[in-house]
Image (spheres, rainbow, N blue to C red):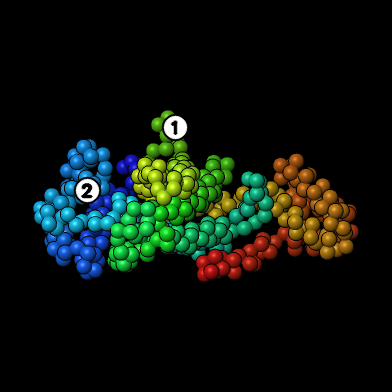
Amino acid sequence: MIPRYTRPEMAAIFEPENRFKIWLEIETLACEKMAELGVIPEACPKALREKGGFDVKRIDEIELEVKHDVIAFLTSVAEHIDDPDASRYVHQGMTSSDVVDTCFAYQLTQAADILLGDLDKLLAALKKRIEEHKNTLCIGRSHGIHGEPTTFGLKLAGHYAAFKRAKQRLTAAREEIAVCTISGAVGTYATINPQVEEYVAARLGLRPETVATQVIPRDRHATFFCTLGVIASSIENFSIEIRHLQRTEVREAEEFFSKNQKGSSAMPHKRNPISTENLTGLARVIRATVTPALENVALWHERDISHSSVERNIGPDATVTLDFALHRLTNVVENLIVYPETMMENLEKMGGLVFSQRVLLALTQAGISREDAYRIVQRNAMKVWESKAQTTLLDALVTDEDVTAKLSEGDLKAIFDYKAYTRHIESIIHRALNS
């Protein structure tokens, strides 16, 4: 986490203050249920509710000596309660992972809620631009080369559908990680009643882990971080599209450029796609957390802490960075400058070659074999290609006897109609927005 790519609400989730606040709540809830079960006196949870607290600096001081963060935390809490008869029952029958793992799961659900909100805002921004440009003709490309006509709205609809899937995946990943473990050393409940776990889980909006070996199984966390990685890839996919469209030779769309913005320290004319380039880089950072999360799944026996140092890094890094990236992408979409006239110029730049498939199909319908039809159309298309569109495909076709023997000039002119490519756009977009 660095300030440049950090938004305060997400960063606050992983601040020590919030982490220890969650730890205290877990300990307090556990004590409440244990007191209800008659395992510890009522004075313990009462003291925690009334006087429970901690001091982050004091915890750091104690940890320097004891080399154990949970023990340092419990010592600080005991100092705040200042009642040995109450504080000695805190953490009764629990192990450190009960607190740490439950807290981390809770933090990830908090982070997921922010990210789901980010996705909602991005989807809303995309929907607005889709409606605006659903009929804006442009060229569809494959391999970076002109393919066939499409609309800019349909381009955006494809990305909308991807981020809609992202929301569904993240919702499922949040459900996967929303678990609690209060099962004691090696997860046998030998020193704590399972009802305590059920109570803590319910109060935190979690559910008990099916089998916690002493830690929550890390396949859950791997699923969560893999989901963030896929979302990051969708961000990069969209960003690359915008970066290509902003290239000087294309210039069909570009990022907003503010009045006093500067594009280059050397070249005053520059207007660069800096936000989407930035997003491409941030996507790499987010995806870099996926492999460590996958490697965390394999732990020794009932537990080790090889995963701990990893998660202290990737937990905040992945969620904070993705939060920033989604916010930035939403801003890009909302303020994207679109040039329909340039889109049309580029669409017509290749002298009608984009209609080649329609000519091919018309010739097959007229009785020519597909192989011969392909050869005839390609032969004429190459003339146009090599003339750099000084000759149009229609001009070439009307002088080809193999073509005119089957199709009249009127038939050929009817083929060169953009409406043939847009007749289903409305229904595809409707499906994307409403499925």
Is residue 314 rendered to the left or right of residue 78? right
Q: Nearer the viewer, residue 217 or 279?
A: 217
In this view, the mark in front (2 or 1) = 2
Task: Give the labeled residue for mark 2.
Answer: 73
The answer, for residue 247, to whether it is visible in the render is yes
Q: Is residue 128 above or below residue 354?
A: below
**Residue displayed at 79% across by 57% down:** 360
Q: Nearer the viewer, residue 389 or 266?
A: 266
Disc 2 + disc 1, Cβ < 8 Å? no
| Quadrant showing the N terminus | top left
Residue 213: percent from left, percent from top: 40, 54
Say which element carries label 2: helix
Q: Amino acid at mark 2?
A: Phe
**Residue displayed at 87% across by 59% down:** 368
**Residue displayed at 52% across by 58% down:** 162
Task: Give the labeled residue for mark 1.
Answer: 267
**Could you give the CA–CA distance between mark 2 and mark 1, rounded to whole angstroms?**
55 Å
Q: Outermost residue, top direction?
A: 266
Q: Outermost residue, front direction?
A: 190
Say which element carries label 1: loop
Is residue 417 rendered to the left or right of residue 267? right
Tell me which numbered mark, 2 or 1, is placed earlier along the sequence: 2
Q: Nearer the viewer, residue 164 or 214?
A: 214
Residue 171: percent from left, percent from top: 44, 62
The answer, for residue 426, to whether it is visible in the render is no
Q: Outermost residue, left direction?
A: 82
**Residue displayed at 36% across by 42% down:** 309
- How many numbered marks appear? 2
Quarter of the rendering containing residue 270:
top left
Decide: few, some or many residues near mark 2? Use Cα within 10 Å; few <14, some 14-19, many ≥20.
Answer: many
Q: Amino acid at mark 1?
A: Met
